[in-house]
């Protein structure tokens, strides 16, 4: 059998993954470095009977994405930092109303208009806390073009499974880099849109077990119900009943935090018998991988923990290594964001160092290797 | 008669949040009569709203209902309609919701001419948040955030909608209920983006502060200041001063967005 091997950009692979996962609706607003995703979907979606719409801004792009999902489509939008800021209000709505959809953020340098074509990882905290109020989020960060394909599929699957918006964070360099990718003939385990099958009269759209998402009927399918961003009970109607509000807010958290084994994914590379752990994600985890390899060759006991799920944070993996290593280094293409999460989990059991680059140029393996050597000798 | 309409309501979700004398209930009544007359399929009708007193009304209506974020109802509605053009989509919005925070979405929904009907409940004030001025508050009126009189100039939402490309635009009032019902019926039946500005009244937060002491006075104000559009157009400016036209203001079909998109799908579909 001939393998379907291609050379493509991360943004293109993201589209291929989305199509493999069943996307049929896209609404968004153009912004570098994410625009190719919109452009390719504008071309591809009508060919499969899907819908593409360019909205008047990102606020509307997020809103229409939610609308498309409520009408039964697997739905997505794509943007970059400034656009993600605008999407945050309705991203929060999608969290509260539990609307499955995928939001891709191809990260560029900030703040503000910043460095539109430069790579960055500056939005990881915006992804976590960009919308107001208590909430849990799922954000995934692929490290290669091939990984972007599978990660986008995973994002759709998690969105459907937990009935919530899921973020895919691409470093600009991942979005725009061209690499070899193999597109499989068939993808297993695509999560379908769940639909209720019970009695229409007594349908309780937001009735769900404490650690699960609801099963929301597509509008037009005969299950009539109410959707609101206000705190609501099982019926979907607003409530201020403290017990019901607490149940909802706990469930919105626990459907993510009680399913960490299912959601959190990491790669542990060279982590047997180590003194020092490098924790990295996205493009920087590749610079880190070569740095770690070189360090190994030089006889240093160094390993790499590659985070593929950024949120919820991989507490259990950091925890596992905190007692085993003397130090951790967290290289990031920003002024230091995830390093604080690592520090929180390590809680003083090992030294934690940030290694950063945020001038628009990609962090090199050499920068990480130098830091590894320095920390290693002083540890 | 009234009993026959009750199936359109979610009676178990009342009592409603509207104040005594509020015009919004009357406009909702006109909408329900229109829906009844049009015999809309409940399962295939979606009512979308933003945030505000008016935007709480979908909760009382027995359809697919979506209460969204402030100003954004039309953007959510656009997604729903494009995703499934079989659905009838009606948007309920306040004057602040539609003309301030949601002004851009209104303009672009008009421009796209997507088959959605928007009913703007214009009570000239931010009701939900207790009486701050809106872009529809007349110059010289008082509001909590215009304690010395409003100096912000307003604008004509219907003219805006016409200018932006809506294909059916009308204005009615809570006083002229049967006319309003007819206008909503026409708007929902017309293909394309339709706007009905329904002049409402907020005795609690607008009237009290502006020498319009109660709902009756405010309804009388509507009766005295509204003028049929046909007559309004013919009269010279000095005769229409202080008055506003009601009735159909614009009715001119244009290609509808979802139909145009379907043409692209038909031409591009891979199995062709
Ligand atoms: C983003 C955001 N900004 C502000 C508010 C506060 N707010 C709620 S309703 C409202 C105004 C509603 O006025 P209008 O749209 O005229 O509707 P009415 O209540 O008069 O029917 C405001 C400012 C909000 N909910 N969300």
Image: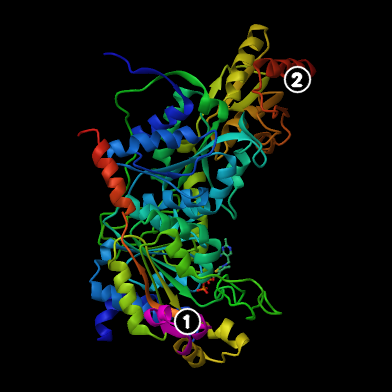
Q: Which residue is mark 1?
A: B236
- Could you say where residue A196 lies in the image, as x and y percent from the top left? 29, 54
- Say whether residue B234 is magenta: yes
Above or below, comparing residue A93 to residue B151 in the picture: above
Residue A241 in view in this figure:
yes
Region in magenta: B224-244
Residue at horizontal 56%, vertical 44%? A84
SS assignment at label 2: helix
- Could you say where residue B23 lies in the image, as x and y percent from the top left? 45, 82
Q: How many residues crowd mark 2 within 10 Å: few (<14), some (14–19), many (20+)? A: some
Q: How many residues crowd mark 1 within 10 Å: few (<14), some (14–19), many (20+)? A: few
Viewer-proximal residue, A262 or B217? B217
Above or below, comparing residue B75 to residue B190 in the picture: above
**What chain is tagged by disc 1?**
B
**What chain is tagged by disc 2?**
A
Color scheme of the displayed model: rainbow
**Residue B49 placement, left or right of B190:** right
Q: Quadrant of the N terminus of chain A?
A: top left
């Amino acid at each position: 059998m001939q393998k379907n091997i291609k050379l493509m950009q991360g943004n293109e692979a993201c589209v291929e993954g989305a199509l493999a996962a069943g996307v049929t609706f896209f609404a968004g607003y153009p912004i570098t470095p994410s625009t190719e995703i919109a452009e390719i979907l504008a071309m591809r979606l009508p060919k499969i009977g899907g819908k593409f719409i360019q909205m008047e801004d990102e606020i509307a792009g997020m809103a229409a994405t939610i609308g498309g999902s409520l009408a039964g489509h697997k739905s997505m939008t794509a943007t970059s930092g400034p656009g993600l800021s605008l999407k945050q209000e309705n991203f929060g709505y999608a969290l509260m109303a539990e609307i499955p959809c995928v939001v891709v953020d191809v990260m560029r340098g900030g703040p503000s208009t910043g460095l539109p074509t430069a790579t960055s990882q500056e939005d990881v905290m915006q992804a976590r806390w960009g919308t107001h109020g208590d909430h849990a989020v799922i954000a995934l960060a692929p490290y290669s073009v091939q990984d972007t394909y599978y990660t986008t599929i995973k994002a759709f699957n998690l969105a459907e499974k937990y009935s919530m918006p899921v973020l895919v964070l691409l470093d600009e360099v991942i979005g725009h880099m061209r690499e070899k990718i193999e597109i499989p003939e068939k993808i297993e385990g695509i999560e379908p849109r769940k639909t209720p099958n019970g009695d229409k009269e007594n349908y309780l759209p937001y009735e769900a077990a404490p650690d699960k998402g609801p099963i929301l009927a597509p509008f037009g399918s005969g299950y009539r119900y109410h959707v609101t961003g206000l705190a609501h009970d099982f019926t979907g109607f607003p409530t201020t009943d403290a017990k019901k509000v607490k149940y909802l807010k706990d469930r919105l958290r626990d459907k993510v935090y009680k399913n960490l084994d299912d959601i959190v994914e990491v790669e542990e590379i060279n982590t047997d018998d180590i003194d020092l752990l490098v924790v990295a994600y996205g493009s920087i985890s590749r610079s880190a991988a070569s740095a770690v390899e070189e360090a190994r060759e030089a006889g240093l006991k160094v390993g790499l923990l590659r985070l593929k799920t950024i949120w919820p944070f991989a507490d259990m993996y950091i925890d596992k290594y905190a007692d085993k290593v003397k130090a951790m280094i967290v290289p990031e293409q920003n002024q230091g964001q995830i390093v604080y999460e690592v520090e929180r989990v390590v809680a003083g059991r090992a030294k934690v160092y940030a290694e950063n680059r945020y001038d628009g140029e990609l962090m090199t393996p050499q920068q990480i290797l130098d830091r590894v050597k320095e920390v290693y000798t002083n540890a | 008669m009234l009993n026959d309409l009750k199936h359109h309501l979610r009676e178990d979700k009342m009592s409603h949040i509207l104040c005594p004398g509020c015009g919004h209930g009357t406009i909702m009544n006109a909408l329900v009569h229109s829906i009844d007359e049009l015999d809309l399929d409940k399962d295939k009708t979606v009512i979308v709203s933003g945030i505000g007193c008016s935007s709480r009304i979908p909760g009382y209506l027995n359809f697919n209902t979506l209460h969204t974020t402030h100003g954004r109802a039309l953007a959510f509605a656009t997604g729903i309609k494009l995703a499934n053009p079989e659905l009838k989509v009606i948007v309920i919005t306040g004057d602040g919701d539609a003309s301030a925070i949601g002004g851009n979405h209104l303009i672009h929904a008009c421009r796209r001419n997507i088959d959605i009907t928007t009913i703007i409940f214009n009570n000239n004030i931010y009701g939900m948040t207790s009486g701050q001025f809106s872009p529809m508050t007349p110059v010289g009126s008082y509001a909590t955030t215009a304690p010395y009189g409003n100096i912000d100039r307003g604008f004509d939402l219907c003219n805006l909608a016409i200018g932006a490309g809506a294909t059916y635009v009308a204005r009615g009032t809570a006083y002229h209920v049967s006319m309003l019902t007819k206008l909503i019926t026409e708007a929902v039946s017309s293909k394309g983006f339709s706007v009905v500005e329904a002049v409402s009244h907020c005795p609690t937060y607008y009237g009290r502060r502006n020498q319009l002491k109660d709902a009756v006075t405010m309804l009388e104000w509507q009766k005295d200041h509204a003028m049929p559009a046909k007559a309004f157009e013919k009269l010279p400016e000095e005769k229409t001063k202080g008055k506003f036209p009601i009735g159909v203001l614009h009715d001119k079909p244009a290609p509808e967005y979802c139909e145009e998109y379907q043409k692209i799908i038909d031409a591009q579909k891979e199995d062709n």
